[in-house]
Image (spheres, grey):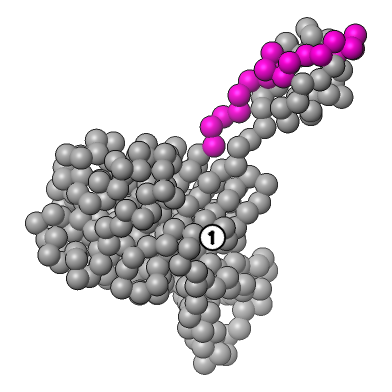
Amino acid sequence: MKLNILGCYSATPRTFTNPTSQVLEINNHLFLIDCGEGTQVQLRKNKIKFSRIKHIFISHLHGDHCFGLAGLISTFKLLTREADLNIYAPKGLKEVITLQMKLSDSWTNFRLIFHELTSKESELIFEDEKVQVYTIPLKHRVYTNGFLFKEKQGERKLDKNAAQEANIDIAYYRKLKQGFDVKNKEGKLIKNESVTFDPTKPKSYAFCSDTMYSESIIPLINNIDVLYHESTFLEKHAHLAEPTKHCTAKQAARIAKEANVRTLVLGHYSTRYDGLEGFKAEAQEIFQNTLLAEDGKTLEF
Ligand SMILES: [Zn+2]
């Protein structure tokens, strides 16, 4: 998995910072997560191929998470896109986008498929042979979901030398990868574990923005590899976090610790702060393996 942070600040685009947007590369997909204003410029700056984006996940309808979408769709049209575009977003965004297209008489020549989200429970919204995507219901001022991206458990890896030595017919290799015991050419049963290795551990990534401190997400993100959790404020501004239904860096760290994730990535910073080191220091008092999201930064895991 590779995570490209296109923008990780809250509220407005500014000279050197961008509102929320990320691209997650996972098993040949390029998933766009949130699409704040200016996302298409950030895609260009980060040299991400527009045509490879087939699925867009929008957490909620606050502008700093979706104002870039109408422009991006319009650009896709100008680039004569033909491939379907799937958009997973709260109910209402379809209305916004179609009204924009209707009033400007600029309907797309590719299929725009909206998957409108309304559930308050976690649900599976995307699945193929290798990847699943679930919603993570969050607590914010408007209906909001985070997203959990999970690789599926892969097949077992064949130890070819061991399989040849055990005199197993090549026709059974597929069965071995699927975990079955098989008979060799002499009819002797060969235990699967003696000729295969464990598959690599599937990776998982959760995007949780925007939200107030909520322990209800912990069962959904338990033991995942990487958690992006919003930390709009520092603890000294906790009185601002509460009414706006955001989190502090300390609260994000508490969630990471309780959920036993491997790495925490902080983001969605308020633009009131001059630097980001305070966020990291505050979170690391509780959860050591904390990284800072920064516009243009790439994380591989
Ligand atoms: Zn918001």
Image quarter (top left, top right, bottom left or bottom right) of the C terminus: top left
Q: Report the amino acid beneath label 1.
A: Glu
- The answer to whether residue 290 is magenta is no
- The answer to whether residue 186 is magenta is yes
Q: Position of residue 126 (x, y in %)?
A: 60, 58
Which residue is at a point 42% across and 62% down the rendered structure image? 137
Instruction: Assess disc 1: are there few (<14), some (14-19) or many (≥20) residues with their C-alpha within 10 Å of its C-alpha.
Output: some
Magenta part of the protein: which range? 184-202
- Looking at the image, is 282 positioned above or below residue 119? above
Drawn side of residue 284 relative to residue 260, left or right: left
- Looking at the image, is 38 positioned above or below residue 106? above
Quarter location, residue 113: bottom right
Main SS of the magenta part reads loop
- Looking at the image, is 224 positioned above or below residue 95? above
Q: Position of residue 152 (x, y in %)?
A: 60, 42
Which residue is at a point 19% across and 66% down the rendered structure image? 242
- Looking at the image, is 183 positioned above or below residue 133? above
Q: Position of residue 45 (x, y in %)?
A: 41, 57
Q: Residue furthest left?
A: 236
Q: Which residue is mark 1?
A: 123
Which residue is at a point 24% across and 58% down the rendered structure image? 247
Q: Evaluate whether residue 242 shows in this view.
A: yes
Quarter location, residue 15: bottom left
Q: Residue furthest right?
A: 186
Drawn side of residue 184 relative to residue 98, left or right: right
Q: Position of residue 175 (x, y in %)?
A: 79, 28
